[in-house]
Image (cartoon, rainbow, N blue to C red):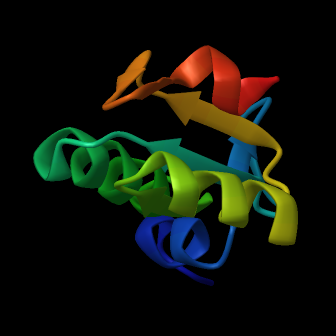
């Protein structure tokens, strides 16, 4: 039997008191501050999500269209652009 840490690393989640094997949701975090971008990515990965980060509006837009995430977490202010433009 696998430990909870191993189950989380393999994309499993705890539901109703049982560990189940689920497809890890893809999350894209877009923020122009490296620390603000990397912390949620690391926390999400530790929880079994397939998370990736982007530090620019342009890179975020490319990742959003090339491999659409299930969830988008975006900073409202991204230099000359804003997160609402990215999300729409």
Q: Residue furthest bottom?
A: 1
Taking the image as shown, residue 70 lies to the left or right of residue 63, namely right
Q: Nearer the viewer, residue 23 or 63?
A: 63
Query: What residue sits 84% from the left and 60% below the top?
Result: 65
For the image shown, how many numbered marks are present on the structure? 0
Query: What residue sits 12% from the left and 47% below the top?
Result: 35
Q: Residue 2 at x, y = what percent? A: 57, 82
Q: Nearer the viewer, residue 33 or 17?
A: 33
Q: Is residue 66 above or below residue 32?
A: below
Q: Residue 83 at x, y = what percent? A: 54, 23
Q: Is residue 6 above or below residue 25?
A: below
Question: Quadrant location of the N terminus?
Answer: bottom right
Query: What residue sits 38% from the left and 29% below the top?
Result: 80
Residue 23 visible in the shown view? no
Q: Residue furthest left?
A: 35
Q: Residue 55 at x, y = what percent? A: 34, 55
Q: Residue 87 at x, y = what percent? A: 73, 27
Query: What residue sits 27% from the left and 43% below the top?
Result: 32
Residue 81 visible in the shown view? yes
Residue 14 occupies quadrant: top right
Question: Quadrant location of the C terminus?
Answer: top right
């Amino acid at each position: 039997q696998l430990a909870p840490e191993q189950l989380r690393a393999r994309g499993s989640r705890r539901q109703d008191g049982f560990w189940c094997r689920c497809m890890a949701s893809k999350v894209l975090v877009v923020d122009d501050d490296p620390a603000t971008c990397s912390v949620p990515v690391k926390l999400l990965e530790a929880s079994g999500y397939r998370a990736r980060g982007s530090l620019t509006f342009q890179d975020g837009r490319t990742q959003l269209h090339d491999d659409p995430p299930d969830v988008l977490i975006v900073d409202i202010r991204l230099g000359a652009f804003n997160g609402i433009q990215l999300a729409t």
